[in-house]
Structure formats: structure tokens, C-alpha cells
Image: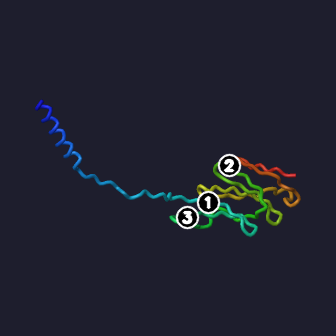
Amino acid sequence: MKTYNYVAYIGMALSILACDTVTNIDTEEPSSLIDADYTVILEKDGLTSAVILAAAEDGMEQKEESVGFEKIPNTSQNYRDQQSIGYYYTNNCQAFVQVFNAQNDNSFVITAFTDINPCDIEVTAIAYTENAIYIAYI
């Protein structure tokens, strides 16, 4: 019987020593702010443009205007895939297609309809792949 009492006393003494150690617990709250940039397509004063926004502690703030996106008229047709957005637009009876990739802030512009007058047709839709651009018109 006394053996059990000794074992119990030793167990309690060890548990007191084990619980006596102090651990440093980091009480600082993790930041909910994620470092991210967003490209937003805006329409203002009859033009479409791209603006880069950054996440800030008090909301969103404008970082800069996208260098890769050329301002285009709002009356354009557009098409979008997983990585880019493309616009068909006319300027002084010349037709253009701009494809913009927001991930790398890069775009390219090509001239369309060099054989017909773009002001004499009505474009109804556009689409594109890596190798081709399709324009439907009447």
C-alpha cells in the first residue's frame, strides 16, 4: 500500500515540475492583409482604360495606370479568355484589335480589315486563340 503512495507522490511532484515551465506564446494577430495587385478595366469619358490597384490596410489604392493597355473607345466589341481580354475598335475608319494580358501587363495591337473600309461594316463579335483572331461582321 505504501508503494502506491510513493508512486502517487512522485507522479504529482513530476507533474508539478512539468507544468511549471513557461512557454512563450505569440499573441500577435496575423495580418489579414494580402499583398496583391489587381488590374481593373474602367470606362470613363468615352474611353476604356486599365488601372492597377493595390491592397492597402484601409482598402484599395490606385497604384498606377497600366502601361500595357492602350486607351480605346467604349464602343468596342470585346472577348475574354482565362488569361487575357481582347477589344475590337475603330479609330478614323481604321480597325484595330488589342489583346491585353493583365498578368504580365502586356498587350499587342494589330490592324484589321486592310482590304475593306471598317466604317462600312458592323462588327457583331470577336474571338481569338493563340494563333488566330476571328471577327464576325455584317
Left or right of 22 on screen, residue 59: right
Tell me if residue 51 comes above or below residue 103 in the rendering.
below
Residue neighbourhood size for the residue with mark 1, other residues' Cα within 10 Å, grouped as few (<14), some (14–19), many (≥20): some
Q: Residue at x 66, y 57 (%)?
A: 100
Q: Amino acid at mark 3?
A: Gly
Identify the secondary structure beneath mark 1.
strand
Q: Circle 2 is placed at which residue position?
A: 81
Q: Circle 1 is placed at which residue position?
A: 39
Q: Amino acid at mark 1?
A: Thr
Residue neighbourhood size for the residue with mark 3, other residues' Cα within 10 Å, grouped as few (<14), some (14–19), many (≥20): few
Instruction: Provide residue 25's location: percent of width, then percent of height.
Output: 32, 54
Tell me if residue 58 comes above or below residue 24 in the rendering.
below
Q: CA distance from mark 2 to mark 1?
A: 15 Å
Q: Residue 103's quadrant in the figure?
A: bottom right
Q: Residue at x 10, y 32 (%)?
A: 2
Does the CB distance between marks 1 and 3 fall below 8 Å? Answer: no
Tell me if residue 52 comes above or below residue 6 in the rendering.
below
Q: Amino acid at mark 2?
A: Asp
In terms of sequence position, does the residue under pointer 1 or pointer 3 come before the other? 1
Q: Circle 3 is placed at which residue position?
A: 59
Identify the secondary structure beneath mark 2.
loop
Quadrant containing the N terminus in the rendered view: top left
Q: Residue at x 82, y 50 (%)?
A: 136
- Residue closest to the far bottom: 45
Question: In the depicted view, which residue is nearer to us: 61 or 124?
Answer: 61
What colour scheme has been applied to the protein in the rendered image? rainbow
Instruction: Provide residue 98's location: percent of width, then percent of height.
Output: 71, 58
Residue neighbourhood size for the residue with mark 2, other residues' Cα within 10 Å, grouped as few (<14), some (14–19), many (≥20): few
Left or right of 7 on screen, residue 25: right
Q: Residue 4's quadrant in the figure?
A: top left
Identify the secondary structure beneath mark 3.
strand
Instruction: Provide residue 82's location: percent of width, then percent of height.
Output: 65, 48
